[in-house]
Image (tube, rainbow, N blue to C red):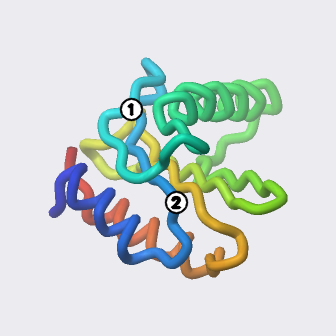
Amino acid sequence: MINTETALKEAMTGIEGALGAALVDYGSGMALGTLGGGKDLDLSVAAAGNTDVVRAKVRTMEMLGLKDEIEDILITLGGQYHLIRLLKSRNNSGLFLYLALDKQRANLAMARHQLKRIESELDV
């Protein structure tokens, strides 16, 4: 099992094109940990904003009566991918991993696969 700091380091160093990563509590919208980002990518703002995205999708699924779980949410920008992966393991409910990727350098399929692996090892 790995902790938050190690998980974020693995995301940033092990996923090609990673620009920033955060572990977020979507109950509060607070980032429990961040790594990367910078002046063009404020991870605290991203954590709060993406919490709204997760909450809206959960509400929509409830209104539609869908009895399924969200694996991840992909937001595609002109130059970036933003991945939101909801955590499912026993100790991590109510959390998501957020990863911003450079679209030119990232392999989206591999990034999703690696984020899933990091999730499976994460213990908060």
CA separation in Å, label 1 and label 2:
16 Å
Observer-nearest of 56 and 110: 110
Quarter where residue 55 is shown: top right
Residue 13, image x, y percentages:
36, 73
> Which residue is at 46% across, 43% downward?
96
Residue shown at the point (66%, 42%) measured from the top left: 67
At 29% from the left and 63% from the top, the residue drawn is 9
Residue where numbered disc 2 is placed: 19
Compared with 113, 21 (above or below) is: above
Task: Look at label 1 and name its amino acid.
Answer: Ala
Most extreme residue toward the top, as rendered? 28
Residue marked by disc 1: 31
Q: Secondary structure at mark 2?
A: strand
Name above or below for residue 31 compared with residue 12: above
Label 1 neighbour load within 10 Å: few <14, some 14-19, many 20+:
many
Residue 21 place in picture, x, y as percent: 44, 52
User: Where residue 120 sits in the image (x, y, percent)?
Assistant: 33, 64
**Quadrant of image for the N terminus:** bottom left
Three-letter residue code for mark 2: Leu
Identify the image quadrant of the C terminus.
top left
Q: Earlier in the sequence, mark 1 or mark 2?
A: 2
Is 32 situated above or below 9?
Answer: above
